[in-house]
Image (spheres, rainbow, N blue to C red):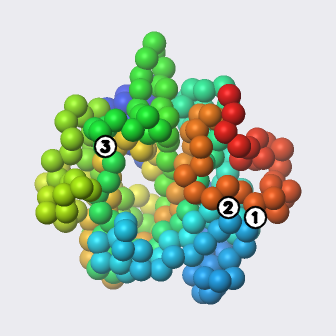
Amino acid sequence: MMTEEQKYLFDLQGWLLVPEVLSAGELTVLNQELDRLLDTPADRFPGSSSKHENCADSSVNGTDTEIFCITECGPAFEALIDHPNVMPYMHEMINHRTLRMTHAYAIARYGGDATTLHRGRIPVAGQCQFRFENGQFHCNMIKVVFCLTDLEAGDGGFSVISGSHKSNFKCFYFDKHDTGRNYHPDDVPVLTELTARRGDIIIFSEDLTHGARTNRSGKERRNVYYSYQPSYMPDWMAAPSEVLLARLTPEQRALMEPPHY
């Protein structure tokens, strides 16, 4: 159950930091597995997973590596699908009788890179809406950021415009249809770079305007992202492979079923 303070902060900010969710053992295995995947050639990824280097669409400088559908890549990532320290938050924030885990991916950001701003409440995107009605959250997409490395000031950590999930105006600082208006994340005065320790999670509504300031630390920043929605919402990435579904527990398979009411 969320505490009253957590409910207040999530409603106010559109994001919530939850400390010490992953154990030291989980972090060790996840980082070892990510090391392996970063060294694996892109044409050798299993199932529906894929590896993308220098992703100019989301990266300011294109100096990053992203791995899509990372749940296909082994037990360490399968275990995050229904992590017991995470699912209570998902049920309370989404508040639908059944949920889906609609996509999961990892990002390694390197020195000098930043993430372009995206999302926000306006224009309205039904798949991402933040709602609170009758004393309960009813959010259409909640994303969990598993921090595999420390996020300190200057590391280019996950950055947000707090409260933008409730804004009635289009974000002033970016417009994907007008590149001349897209500010560099470092030049957005209301963007806040969040700090966290390895093992913490950051939970946020996809309606929140977010991105990342420049990584000035010279260190590699690693996050894994899992996204949850009501069960009627479609996948954002490739559907899970039959090989993956055969490996999962019944509870995990229920979270990976095709869209349904």
Q: Earlier in the sequence, mark 1 or mark 3?
A: 1
Residue 256, position as x, y percentages in the image = 71, 47
Q: Amino acid at mark 3?
A: Gly
Q: CA distance from mark 1 to mark 3?
A: 34 Å
Q: CA distance from mark 2 to mark 1?
A: 8 Å
Q: Quadrant of the N terminus?
A: top right
- 114 versus 85 height, above or below: below
Q: Quadrant of the C terminus?
A: top right
Which callout, 1 or 3, points to the residue nearer the camera?
Answer: 3
Q: Amino acid at mark 2?
A: Thr
| Rendered residue at 75%/64% (across/down) | 75
Q: Is residue 116 left or right of residue 100?
A: left
- 115 versus 144 height, above or below: below
**Nearer to the camera, 41 or 110:** 41
**Nearer to the camera, 9 or 129:** 129
Q: Amino acid at mark 1?
A: Pro
| Rendered residue at 44%/39% (across/down) | 128
Q: Secondary structure at mark 2?
A: helix
Q: Return the residue at label 2.
A: 71
Residue 123, position as x, y percentages in the image = 29, 39
Q: Is residue 90 visible to the viewer in this orientation of the structure?
A: yes
Residue 169, position as x, y percentages in the image = 19, 36
Callout 2 touching callout 1 (CB < 8 Å): no
Q: Is residue 200 visible to the viewer in this orientation of the structure?
A: no
Q: Secondary structure at mark 1?
A: helix
Residue 75 — which label? 1
Residue 58, position as x, y percentages in the image = 37, 66
Residue occupying the far front of the picture: 177
Residue 120 — which label? 3
Q: CA distance from mark 3 to mark 2?
A: 27 Å
Q: Is residue 252 left or right of residue 259?
A: right
